[in-house]
Image (tube, coloured by chain):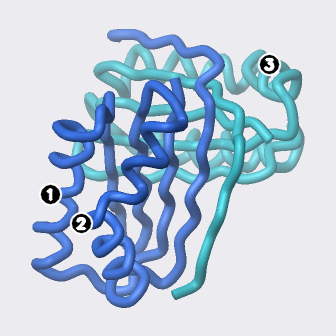
Chain colours: A blue, B cyan
Amino acid sequence: MYAVIFKAKIKKLDEEYAQVATRMKELALEQYGCLEFVSVIEGENEIAISYWENEDDIKIWKNDPEHILAQELGKTKWYESYKVQIVEVIREHSGNT
Amino acid sequence: MYAVIFKAKIKKLDEEYAQVATRMKELALEQYGCLEFVSVIEGENEIAISYWENEDDIKIWKNDPEHILAQELGKTKWYESYKVQIVEVIREHSGNT
């Protein structure tokens, strides 16, 4: 399994951000085979992680026209800076406490 | 480069949590070779990611006595459930907007 870690310093979020973020999550999960999508915002820091079966799915998702537009909006309006990391999950464990 | 993704559903955070979280970050960075440590909390969701040069460093850090105690406190007091994923960073890109 692979994941895309997106970390950003937020400039200014607006109502359009909320709409686009919801739409991107829906699109990734329903039409591009995204396995899981989590995002957390605290103050000026955002971390979002999406999980994928393989790297091809990530590339195809990256080139979706609506997603390209959202990436542009992110760069021009919402984020001060950002970092994207493509990672492979080596192992995992979880627990209910 | 490797990373540890820690995701948790929060049960209840307290003052001890803030102290221990700060101490763990400091310890990982200053004594265990952690390259970067980021964490974001929103509502009941926490995502923390630490970055490491290799997997051995991660294993050594996991077994630090103070860290073991913190993990136990997390399981018994602070978290409802959690997931830990060890990942390898394949590629990354970043931007200032």
Question: Disc 2 or 1, which lies upstream in sequence?
Answer: 1
The number of numbered discs placed on residues in the rendered structure image is: 3
Q: Check if mark 3's residue and mark 2's residue have beta carbons within 8 Å.
A: no
Residue plotted at (50% across, 29% down): A54
| Chain of residue at mark 3 | B
| Label 1 SS | helix
The amino acid type found where label 1 is placed reads Arg
Determine which residue is flagged by label 1: A23
For residue A66, the mark is: 2
The amino acid type found where label 3 is placed reads Lys
Residue A65: give x, y in percent of width and height: 28, 66
Q: Who is closer to the viewer here, A6 or A28?
A: A28
Location of the C terminus of chain A (image quadrant)? top left
Residue plotted at (80% across, 41% down): B1
| Label 2 SS | helix
Determine which residue is flagged by label 3: B59
Residue plotted at (41% across, 47% down): A60
| CA gap, disc 3 and disc 2 | 41 Å
Can residue B16 be seen by looking at this rendering? no
Residue B15: give x, y in percent of width and height: 42, 45
Q: Check if mark 1's residue and mark 3's residue have beta carbons within 8 Å.
A: no
Q: Who is closer to the viewer here, A21 or B30?
A: A21
| Chain of residue at mark 2 | A
Pair 2/1: label in front: 2
